[in-house]
Image (tube, helix red, strand yellow):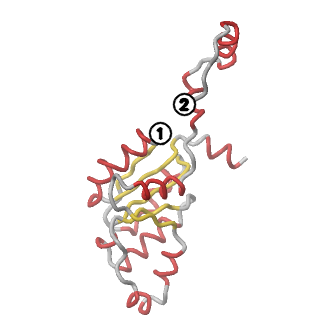
Amino acid sequence: MREVLMLEKEFDVLVCWTAVDGELVRGALLPTLSLKYKYRVHAVLLSTQPDTWYSELVGEASRCRSLVAVLSPAQHSPQQLLTALRQLRALPLPPVVVLLQDLPKLKREAKEGGESLVSTLRGTRLVAWRHVHERAFWTALRLALPLPPAARARTDTKTNPEQDDNKNSRSGSLTALV
């Protein structure tokens, strides 16, 4: 039952980011997910401060099957990074976090923050961005996301699938499966 409800969502992926990452998201991530991999993508620009991300995203997340959050760790203090991850993880969809830079060395922050940032990071699906043409990134991202509903695109365009199937069988032609 849960799978049926998930497939009935309006979008496959909710992609969110802050203005600093907009060029990469709009230029590479969104077009590749939608055009090459056929995901129905919903995009949301987040405010710079992560304190309100939950309230900005909770309504949008209900329309989507999965969530991809693009983060530049260098743009945030360790405390802001922890707040951002907590806001994202509180959403009903478990986030896939695309990191545009390596995480800063967190040994000092782990000591000061009681390991909370490190443990939160360990409990989050992280995918490191390197380059738009890096296959390993796209493979890792797609493995973290649900499959796009391929059959939906074909059946939405047909008015009556049974009628079309009957036409094909009467004509005697063979339809190749691709």
The answer to whether 77 appears left or right of 116 in the picture is left
Q: Amino acid at mark 2?
A: Ala
The answer to whether 128 appears left or right of 5 in the picture is left
Q: Residue furthest right?
A: 1
In terms of depth relative to the viewer, which is nearer, 105 or 120? 105
Q: Residue at x 54, y 55 (%)?
A: 143
Residue 22 x/y as whole percent: 29, 54
Q: Which residue is mark 2?
A: 153
Q: Residue at x 42, y 52 (%)?
A: 15
Q: Which residue is mark 1?
A: 38
Q: Residue at x 48, y 65 (%)?
A: 88
In terms of depth relative to the viewer, which is nearer, 175 or 48? 175
Q: Quadrant of residue 171?
A: top right
Q: Residue at x 40, y 69 (%)?
A: 51
Callout 1 touching callout 2 (CB < 8 Å): yes
Q: Amino acid at mark 1?
A: Lys
Graded by Cα atoms within 10 Å as few (under 14), some (14 to 19) or many (20 or more), the crowding at tag 2 reads few
For residue 54, above or below residue 12 = below
Graded by Cα atoms within 10 Å as few (under 14), some (14 to 19) or many (20 or more), the crowding at tag 1 reads some
Q: For numbered disc 1, what is the local secondary structure?
A: loop
Q: Is residue 56 visible?
A: no
Residue 119 x/y as whole percent: 52, 80
Q: Quadrant of residue 152?
A: top right
In terms of depth relative to the viewer, which is nearer, 141 or 120? 141
In terms of depth relative to the viewer, which is nearer, 148 or 3? 148
Residue 99 x/y as whole percent: 38, 65
Q: Is residue 116 visible?
A: yes
